[in-house]
Image: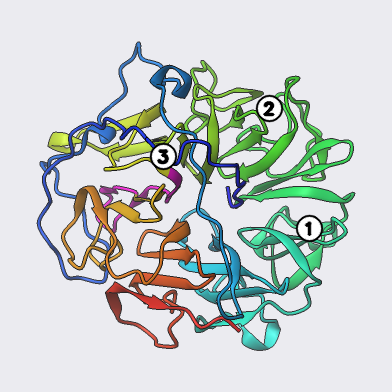
Amino acid sequence: MHSTRRHPDRHRSGLLVVAFLAAGAAAASCSSEEALDWPAGAPVDASSAPPDAGAEATSPADAGLVDASPLPIVCTSPPCAASIVTTLGRDEDDRGEGFCALVDDGAVACWGANGAGQLGRGEAAGAIDSANAAKVVGLPKVTALDHTCAIDEVGGVWCWGTGPFLRPDAGAVTTTERTPVKLELPPATSVGLGHGAACATTGDGLRCWGDNVDGQIAPLAETDVTGAPRLVPLPVGAPVRALAVGKASFVLREDGTLVTWGGNPPIGRRSPMFPDPYPQPAALAGIAAVDLVHDNACATAGGIGYCWGARVMANQGSVVDRALPEPVVAPEPLVQIATTRTFSSSTGALQRYRWCAVAISGSVYCWGRNESGQAGDGTQDHALGAVLVRDLPAPAAQVRTTPSTTCALLTNGKVYCWGGNYNGQLGNGQDRGRTSVPTAVVLP
């Protein structure tokens, strides 16, 4: 989910440090730009263990932890970013290594992969990747952003790239749009985009559209689902704060409850249905921020990061589903956390997905694969425990991550990225290469 709600920080002094599970030892380093198979016998951090069949997620209210908020962004020298997001690829198998930023003048600037049109630069740009951040063409002033969908000042929904963009004349649920198209929807306050489905909150409720293979638009027994927007009934509850859509759909409410439906995992709750098309509260409450990328999700609640979702590789090469939220390992309270989806390598072995998080201090921590320096600790050693990102010139307010690269939005409004650069996703004007040292993105 790609929006941040700022709350008054009532407990900045006298914070309790979160008690965390022990982290695993570091894995061997690797130097190839291509993703490598995770060693079958590698030790894992406790957050990657299979969930206890009888365990539910710990409630932040019971844990007695902190009510933390991201640090505010104060632009020091325009242009500055107000938020950052990752882009989506052509389909579920395309990593879509790229990023977009909502710039303080209401424009959207994107860089990185462009095979799915996710840079929004028009037909003349073709499918050429770009290491230079440039504005998406044809957008009015934007107030909110999720992947490659944006909401303008009057609630209009605009999308570009590849996705379910309500183009009935195309004869397909998903299309590729190299410039933004305005979707035929009532004025919206939030939008969530996945590869095959999308949702928006409008004056008459939650509308979802696209592919119903995971029951995100309607119960699977219904046969008249055509990809057009449909009202999805939600349980009675607090107003909607934000949306996220991947293999499942998430509605984050103002009271911190999370309503989920669709693919199982990553709905984050017990259900006998696979998928589960009926919106119900997830197992975790008191949520401040959530991120969903296809089949994996992470959230922060009470200063603790939680992650859950698709299959991961555990000790001795076994494969497990992490169906319910489990706490992750970090050295201080977290205010925002981002994840990636799970991928298979060319040999068919599952690769661990990654997490990066912003702590209450503004420090950034990452863990997971690190063959391109995407963990940011100055090495290419796999990070089986949280490692501190080094050399950021200011505290961070937001972080987003892909399998190969990580970008952070700093409190001064600047964006820094590190890791792989095969698609120009570092935004530093250089093709290829990699770096474990954060490098500045030049915003237009």
Q: Count residues near mark 3 (Cα–Cα under 10 Å), then give few for <14, some for 14-19, many for 20+.
A: few
Q: Secondary structure at mark 2?
A: loop
CB-based contact (under 8 Å), mark 2 and mark 1? no
Question: What's the CA distance linking mark 2 and mark 1?
Answer: 22 Å
Q: Is residue 367 left or right of residue 407?
A: left
Question: What's the CA distance linking mark 2 and mark 3?
Answer: 50 Å
Magenta stretch in the rendered image = 335-353
Q: Which residue is mark 2?
A: 220
Quadrant for the C terminus in the image: bottom right
Q: Which residue is mark 1?
A: 171
Identity of the residue drawn at 44% across and 74% down: 425
Question: What's the CA distance linking mark 1 and mark 3?
Answer: 58 Å
Residue placed most toward the observer, 440 or 363: 363
Identity of the residue drawn at 66% across and 81% down: 121
Q: Amino acid at mark 3?
A: Ser
Q: Amino acid at mark 2?
A: Leu
Q: Which residue is mark 3?
A: 13
Q: Is residue 279 above or below residue 292?
A: above
N-term-proximal mark, 2 vs 1: 1
Q: Is residue 99 left or right of residue 225?
A: left
Q: Amino acid at mark 1?
A: Gly
Q: Is residue 306 left or right of residue 41?
A: right
CB-based contact (under 8 Å), mark 2 and mark 3? no
Q: Is residue 148 above or below residue 301?
A: below
Q: Position of residue 176 (x, y in %)?
A: 68, 67
Q: Position of residue 72 (x, y in %)?
A: 55, 57
